[in-house]
Amino acid sequence: MKFKDNKISFSILLILFIYSCSSAELNHSEVENVNENRSVQDTTFSLEDLYFLKGNWVDSVTFKLYNQEFFDSWSISNDSILGKTFQLKKDSLKTDTLSEESMAMFSVGDRVMYIIRKPEYPVLVYPSNKKSGDSLIFKNMANESLQEIIFINESSKVLKLLLRGYQADYKREVIYNYKRI
């Protein structure tokens, strides 16, 4: 009797195993279909899609705890967009510039290249990846610390900048909340 019960238990486990494998295969194909549909909606973007950056922006919220603000200034020059960003630290007596970066965006073929240059650091290059809604995504997975830069145009006066980095066992991201000044 005991042997017969083991056969039944084994049969039930085998049936459950086969069903779960076929169910996982179905779920995997559903995910692939969703990704295929999503990639059809996502499109590349042009330099003109970034013209909303023109002007001066300030983020005084993201690092408020550390008395730090970020100022960005963007201009359109011929066939490129040029920018500068400053990280400022304020205290009751003075304001210090902690860092400064120069940025440039220009078209190369059907892609927009985003170049970041910080003194005494290597130049970082991010090709345009896709446009999804109001988000313009630049991606460079070869970079060690920062792989994605996402500009989110919330309105004519509000811009979010999402910086995302992936490591083997975690994902790190910072969202800057800019307002036009």
Image (cartoon, helix red, strand yellow):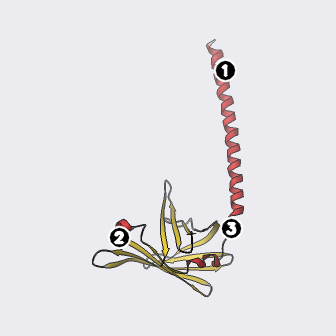
Q: Along the line of sight, which residue is nearer the eye, 165 or 59? A: 59
* Mark 2 surroundings within 10 Å by alpha-carbon count, few (fewer than 14), some (14 through 19), many (20 or more): some
What's the amino acid at mark 1? Ile
Quarter of the image where one finds residue 115 = bottom right
Say what secondary structure mark 3 lies in: loop
Q: Is residue 154 above or below residue 73?
A: above
What's the amino acid at mark 2? Asn
- Name the residue: 52% across, 68% down: 160
Disc 2 vs disc 1: which is toward the camera? Answer: 2
x and y, in percent, of residue 30 in the image: 70, 48
Quarter of the image where one finds residue 113 = bottom right
Marks 2/1 in contact by CB < 8 Å: the verdict is no
Q: Along the line of sight, which residue is nearer the eye, 9 or 85? A: 85
On screen, residue 111 versus residue 163, left or right, reads: right
Say what secondary structure mark 2 lies in: loop
x and y, in percent, of residue 130 in the image: 64, 67
Q: Earlier in the sequence, mark 3 or mark 1?
A: 1
Q: Give the label on residue 40, or none.
A: none
